[in-house]
Structure formats: C-alpha cells, structure tokens
Amino acid sequence: MNKESKDYIRITGGKSLSGEIELRGAKNSVPKEMVATLLTTETCNLSNVANIRDVDLVGEMLEVYGASVTQPTGTSFQISTENITQQSAEVITEFAGKSRIPILFSGPLLHRFGETIIPGLGGCAIGERPINFHVDALRQMGAEVIEKDGCTLLKAKKLHGTKLRLEYPSVGATEQVVMSAVLAEGVTELKNSAVEPEIIDLICLLQKMGAIISVDTDRTIKILGVDKLRGYDHTAIPDRLEAASWACVALATRGEIKVKHARQQDMITFLNKYRQVGGEFDVVEDGIRFWRQKEVLSPVALETDVHPGFQTDWQQPFVLALTQANGVSVIHETVYEDRFGYTRAINQMGGQIQLFRECLGSVQCRFGQKNHLHSAVVVGPQKLRAADITVPDLRAGFTYVAAALVAEGTSQINNINLINRGYEDFETKLRKIGANIES
Ligand code: EPU
C-alpha cells in the first residue's frame, strides 16, 4: 500500500536532473491483468507490479469478492479467484468514483455469476469519458444492461460471439470485448479496435491462459471462445507513459536520465518527436538514456492519436518541455476533448499557451466544431516562475512537478496523492535524480 503522507510537495527548480530511474509494470496493463484472474479458478502469478494506487484498488476489489490476493514479493502478486462469491450493491458501490477499471469486471463476472453490478466510474477528469461502447458491445454479446442510480447492472446467462465495430478505437472498450469474448460462445470479431502495447500484453496473457485470439493488421481482433481458461504466470510490460514523463524532465531541465526497462518498440513515435525538438537518446541493453542534445530546442507540430500515434498521455509533460523551445509549437489533442486544463497552471507560472476550439492539425477530429478547447499553441521559450498549485489529475500532476523543476523559486504542489495513482515512488525517484524537494 502507498503511505499517504503529507499531500503536498515543495520543489525548488532550476537544477539539471540526472541519474537513473527504474520502471515497473504499466499502470494501464497491470490492473487489467489482475481483472483477468476472474476468468479462471486457477491461481495466477503476475510479476513486475508497481506500488501504485490503481493496482491497490483492483486488489481491494478482488478481495471484496473473496479472492485471495497475496504478494510473495514486493513486486509480484499471486491471485486466486476460486472462492469468489456474488456481492451486494452496497459493498460494490464503495468503489464508486475511484477508477475506470471496474467496468472491465463486467465480462469476467458475467461468466462467473450470470449477473453483476458495476459501480459508477472515476478516473481523470479529461473529458466526458462515456461507457457507451462498452455497453453496446456487451448488449450485442447478449447481456441485458441497465444503468441505474449511477451503477451498471448486467445480466447474461451466457455471452455469445458477434461482429462488432467500435466507432473509435477505444482502449477500454477493446479490452472489454476481448475479456468478455474469450469465454463466450462462438467467434467474436472486433473491427476498429485499439492495439496499444498494453492491450497486446493483455492478449498475450490471455493466450497463455488458453484463449484463442488473433490481431490483424487492419485493427481487427478475432476471438474464438473457449470453455475454460487456466491460470497464468506473466510479467507485465514496463510503463512507457512513465518513461516518456521522465524523458521530458531530462529535456526540460537540461539533464540526462536513464530510464531502466524503457522499451524502444513501445515508444517509436515519442522518440521521433523527442529527437525533432532537440532531445537525444541512446537505446541501451536495459533501457533508454535521454538527454537534451540541442542548446536551443525547436518547436514542433503534433497531434495525439491512438497507438501507434503520439499517445495522449505523453502530451502534457511534452508540452511542458515545449514551453522551453524557441518558437511556436502547435498541438492537436484528438483523443480527449478536455485534456488541456493543466495549461492554466503552466500559464500562471509564466507559460504562454493559448487554447483553440479548432482542429489545428491535419486531422479533422471528433471534437472540431463542438466548442471543445482541444488545440494548443505554445510560444517559447518562457522563463517559468514558482507557484502554489493543486493537482487536478494524474498526468497534469506530473507535469506540474516538471514545471516546478524548471521554474525559478520554490513551488508548492498540493494534492500529490493523485500522482501516486500512476507513478510509483515518484518522490524517491525525484530525490535520486537530484531534485531539490521537501515533502
Ligand atoms: N470513449 C467513448 N465511449 C466509450 C469509451 C471511450 O466515447 O465507451 C471515448 C473517450 O471518451 C475518449 C476516447 O474514446 O475520448 C478514448 O478513450 P479510451 O476508451 O481509449 O480510454 P480509456 O480506456 O478510458 C485508457 C487509459 C488512459 C488513456 C486512454 C487512451 C486506462 C486505465 N486508462 O483509458 O490513461 O489515456 O486509454 O490511451 O487504461 C492515463 O494513463 O493518464 C490515462 C488517462
């Protein structure tokens, strides 16, 4: 469990940060791989688990159903869901508003109990984040879905395969379909699916469990349902989103950070942009070393996208680094309609970032003409000044920390426990690379 100490940190900026930080299993993989333990009554072993709040939460939710969740080592879990039992709405709604992962319990629990209740979801406030794709897919697979009092009630004697097409390649909805289809009757075909590395890792894990899943080059995933799955032994892939966050700190503070276990194949698009702005990197045997190559950083135009595009979760710390580039950068966020909220605080610190409703890029995205401030123009270089700021969501939180590391003076960042949702031991890591912090 994370020790929830004081919920603020003070950072005195202006230092170049250098050293090594180590990644663990991806925040957007591990919790889902824990949910997959509900697909079997056999014991599952998951390694490379980070000590972050989203992982704790799924462990707690599994335990509420009666699962045995033990940690033979600090970074591995042994989970058995053999003795789980159905739980009441009162117990389940304790988890309301805390995360988006509970929606992924739908398919596995329908297979176990024939009915289930999913609490209202939480997660970062970066857009409306509806669950219509999940609900539509489950309905088409034979589930009765009722949305009531903020919860989702589901019933299905047996889910069956079907042909589905996502309106947008949603990560969560793809995972929903895959985890529901592996034990469904017949074949499920999902077109326009997301193919993020974290999803491929989940598919590999399910294949180890006995599932039959193929991924075509045109974003089509096909799943042939089987009667039974077995336990797994699996090591989660490292967190490429955290890797990029530290790479941006190296760029913005003129430092040099080796991110142990970072994998080039999961970050190709990020690495190209990093080099384009004046960062450089070395892919070494056990990770990637990042540093600032050019004295003066160059501005860029970039659009976020689903994988293999530039990930939306890389956007915020990268924009912070762009405040130090010499010229005008243009960023078009096409995944979430409201993911620039953090720029207000960066501007308060001296940044010059202006938001636009228009699609400032080559893609006409779903948010154009709809009054969403989803494009940004960043004018740099700007000297940042310290500020007293409060973290609104996970990636914004890390970005505030990065801004404070660049800024002149001592900043106070409040509500830092939100950062623990996805960054393991970030204060220890900051100290290790020489940051001047007080908490
Ligand atoms: N969407 C719908 N309907 C749905 C589902 C999604 O309209 O039923 C829309 C969303 O509103 C959004 C877009 O589709 O505009 C993409 O959402 P997606 O479903 O892909 O996101 P998610 O599964 O809820 C995961 C990560 C996010 C990451 C996104 C995109 C987890 C727990 N979360 O969210 O991670 O940004 O995929 O890659 O895996 C983060 O790590 O900071 C984070 C927010």
Image (cartoon, rainbow, N blue to C red):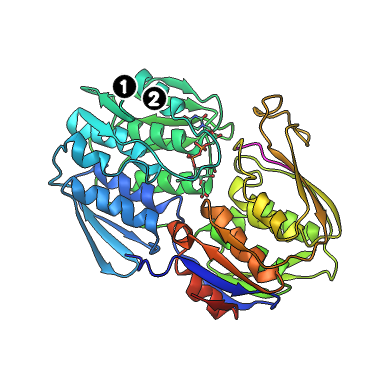
State the image coordinates of residue 103 (x, y, percent, origin top left). Answer: 36, 36
For marks 1 and 2 on the same chain, the one whose residue lies earlier in the sequence: 2
Residue position for label 2: 135
Horizontally, residue 292 falls left or right of residue 167, namely: right
- Is 141 magenta? The answer is no
- Real-space CA distance between mark 1 and mark 2, rounded to the nearest whole angstrom: 7 Å
Residue 370: name its quadrant: top right
Among the 4 quarters of the image, the one containing residue 68:
bottom left
Q: Is mark 2 on a helix, strand or loop?
A: helix
Q: Is residue 114 at least partly visible in the picture?
A: yes
- The answer to whether the residue bearing label 1 lies less than 8 angstroms from the nearest atom of ligand 1 is no
Secondary structure state at the residue bearing disc 1: strand
**Which label is found at residue 355?**
none
Name the residue: 16% across, 36% down: 88
Mark 2 is surrounded, within 10 Å at the Cα level, by few (under 14), some (14 to 19) or many (20 or more) other residues, namely many
Q: Name the residue under label 1.
A: 145
Residue 209 seen from this side: no
Q: Which of 190 and 316 is in front in this view?
A: 316
Would you say the residues marked 1 and 2 are in contact, meaning their CB atoms lie under 8 Å apart?
yes
Q: Give the range drawn in magenta.
A: 331-335
x, y (%) of residue 428?
Answer: 48, 75
Which residue: 31% across, 50% down? 58
Q: Which amino acid does label 1 sit on?
A: Val
The residue under the point 57% across, 68% down is: 412
Residue 310 location (% of width, % of height): 66, 46
Q: Nearer the viewer, residue 410 or 320?
A: 410
* Above or below for 114 versus 238: above
Quadrant of the frame with the N terminus: bottom left
- The answer to whether 182 is drawn above or below residue 417 in the figure is above
Please tell me whether the stretch drawn in magenta is mainly helix, strand or loop: loop
Ligand 1 under 8 Å from disc 2 Cβ: yes
